[in-house]
Amino acid sequence: MKNEMTVIFDAVSENEAFARNTVAAFCVTLDPTVDQINDIKTAVSEAVTNCIVHAYPNSGTNKITIVTTVDDCSVHIVVSDTGVGIEDVDAAKQPFFTTKPEQERSGMGFTVMESFMDELNVQPNIPSGTVVTMFKTIRGADWKKKKL
Amino acid sequence: MKIEHFKKSDELHIKLYGELDEHHSSYVRTSLDSLLDADNFSRLYIDMSELDFMDSTGIGVLIGRYKRLKPRGIPIFIQAPPPSVDRVLGLSGIYDIMIKAG
């Protein structure tokens, strides 16, 4: 069964814990392991932090949208903003690449997302902003076989 | 986020509690720096056993503290990171510049 949740919230750092915990809570129907839940929390936190730090450098009414879809065995997460887009996505995905080294940024956000999820896709949002899509298989082939 | 510390001979021990993300990073950064600048010590231990969550923002905070202590020749030891924190640390190459101790 497909099940979808959309949350839209203000792009403020107070909401980071809310965002990662909400997405993680929505995934529990898949019976994930503790490690898998932590992977999802960390990846969502990275995506949301990017929006807050990079997409919306100025305060105001800035919104982040997360659409989470689960099916029988996997989770699909789309984090989007309508702020400042990423100039060079390939460069941004390189480990330790950061446009804000003076802020002690590690430049590891996309690397963490890529490592903790099975798939990562970064696209421009039209007309402005970024759409980050992440996918992770929670229940593998063993589970599917058992179910049949 | 909560930070505790104590001195043991020439060692400064710091323990992190809670979730280290962007929201708590400036508090952690400021608190750590006031501890690092106030004391004379020759080794820094950071106990992460009660750190429930950390993302790459925490890596930035750690690298910043490393740069601060490097001129003083003070090594940093990371203690008991939970598995998820350990993965972020490993991925970021933190263990090339800090020592994992228990």
Image (cartoon, rainbow, N blue to C red):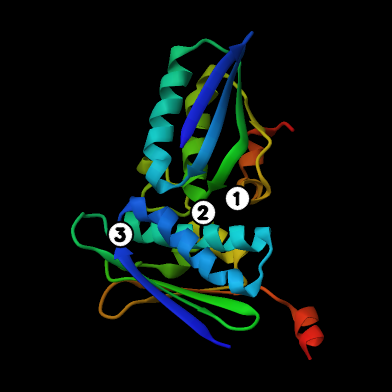
Q: Which amino acid type is marked by label 3?
A: Ala
**From the viewer's perspective, is B20 left or right of A49?**
right
In this figure, which residue is indicated by the disc labeled 1?
B88
Note whether A28 is above or below B68 in the view shown. below
Residue in front for this viewpoint, A133 or A73: A73
In this figure, which residue is indicated by the disc labeled 2?
A108
- In the image, which disc is placed on residue A11? 3
Q: Secondary structure at mark 3?
A: loop
* Residue at the (60%, 50%) spot, across then down: B88
Spot occupied by residue B13 in the image (x, y as percentages of width and height): 59, 21
Proximity of marks 1 and 2: CB atoms separated by less than 8 Å: yes
Q: Are marks 2 and 3 on the same chain?
A: yes
* Residue at the (53%, 59%) spot, across then down: A41
Question: Quick one: quadrant of the C terminus of chain B?
Answer: top right
**From the viewer's perspective, is A26 left or right of A30?**
left
* Residue at the (20%, 62%) spot, across then down: A61
Spot occupied by residue A116 in the image (x, y as percentages of width and height): 61, 63
Note whether A141 is above or below B52 in the view shown. below
Whether residue A101 is visible to the viewer of this picture, yes or no, is no
For the residues labelled 3 and 1, the Cα–Cα distance comes to 24 Å
**From the viewer's perspective, is B40 left or right of A11?**
right
Q: Point out the tag, 2 or 3, that comes first from the N-terminus.
A: 3
Q: Which amino acid type is marked by label 2?
A: Met
For the residues labelled 2 and 3, the Cα–Cα distance comes to 20 Å
Crowding at mark 2 (Cα within 10 Å: few <14, some 14-19, many 20+): many
